[in-house]
Image: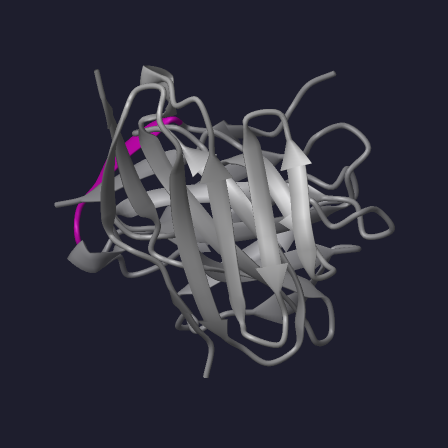
Amino acid sequence: DAGVTQSPTHLIKTRGQQVTLRCSPKSGHDTVSWYQQALGQGPQFIFQYYEEEERQRGNFPDRFSGHQFPNYSSELNVNALLLGDSALYLCASSLVQGDNEQFFGPGTRLTVL
Amino acid sequence: GQNIDQPTEMTATEGAIVQINCTYQTSGFNGLFWYQQHAGEAPTFLSYNVLDGLEEKGRFSSFLSRSKGYSYLLLKELQMKDSASYLCAVEIVDSSYKLIFGSGTRLLVRP
């Protein structure tokens, strides 16, 4: 049973560029949440997708956008990258009718130079 | 606003017991998770409390008091591999469920 997978593992970009991160949820899960984790901090909620729609959003600017596909996989897009966007981006999947436990992927380490 | 507090760092000795506290002030509280995160890795689930009281799972136990906005994670018989960050996360319900994380507690287990 495949767990949550994310790609790429690492990514280096420069300021002003755009980036797309990808996530495949755990088999059978239908909900995907994205988090940003700066070094030494806890994960910060970005947004959550269910049925291909954004259901909830944290305090992140519109430069952060996402998408969920019919197979429940998801993308996180960040435009006009800033140095402060450097972080570990975590994807977590869950089942909306389940016990709400979120399973985390290994994350994508984004470095903005 | 949503606020979750936990100590930044703790140190304990192998074989000992350590308690990591978490206090929270949130709206829409539904439950509380504890996650373990080793450096450079994803958080892994440890426990989930919805009702007041103690939940025990092997060497790990978690306690919740909803009226006091307080939880703790108790780790017994500490092992070197328990050195990690421990994240307290409050589950919030409004239009759906989402997690609000504390900054994490870095636990160092020494021989």
Q: Tell me the residue at 70%/76% (across/down).
A: B94
Q: Give, as a single range, the part of the protein colored magenta.
A: A9-15
Q: Please determine whether, in this image, residue B110 is positioned above or below residue A77.
A: above
Q: Tell me the residue at 63%/70% (across/down).
A: B66
Give the percent coordinates (x, y) of residue A112: 19, 46
Q: Tell me the residue at 50%/41% (across/down).
A: B35
| Residue A103 visible (yes or no) | no
The one of A37 and A40 positioned closer to us in this rendering: A40
Q: Tell me the residue at 28%/61% (across/down).
A: A80
Residue A12 highlighted magenta (yes or no): yes
Instruction: Specify whether B53 is left or right of B36.
Output: right
Instruction: Specify whether A83 is left or right of B71.
Output: left
User: Quick one: quadrant of the N terminus of chain A?
Assistant: top right
The colour mode here is one colour
Residue B107 highlighted magenta (yes or no): no
Quadrant assignment, res A82: bottom left
Quadrant assignment, res B90: bottom right
The one of B36 and A42 positioned closer to us in this rendering: B36
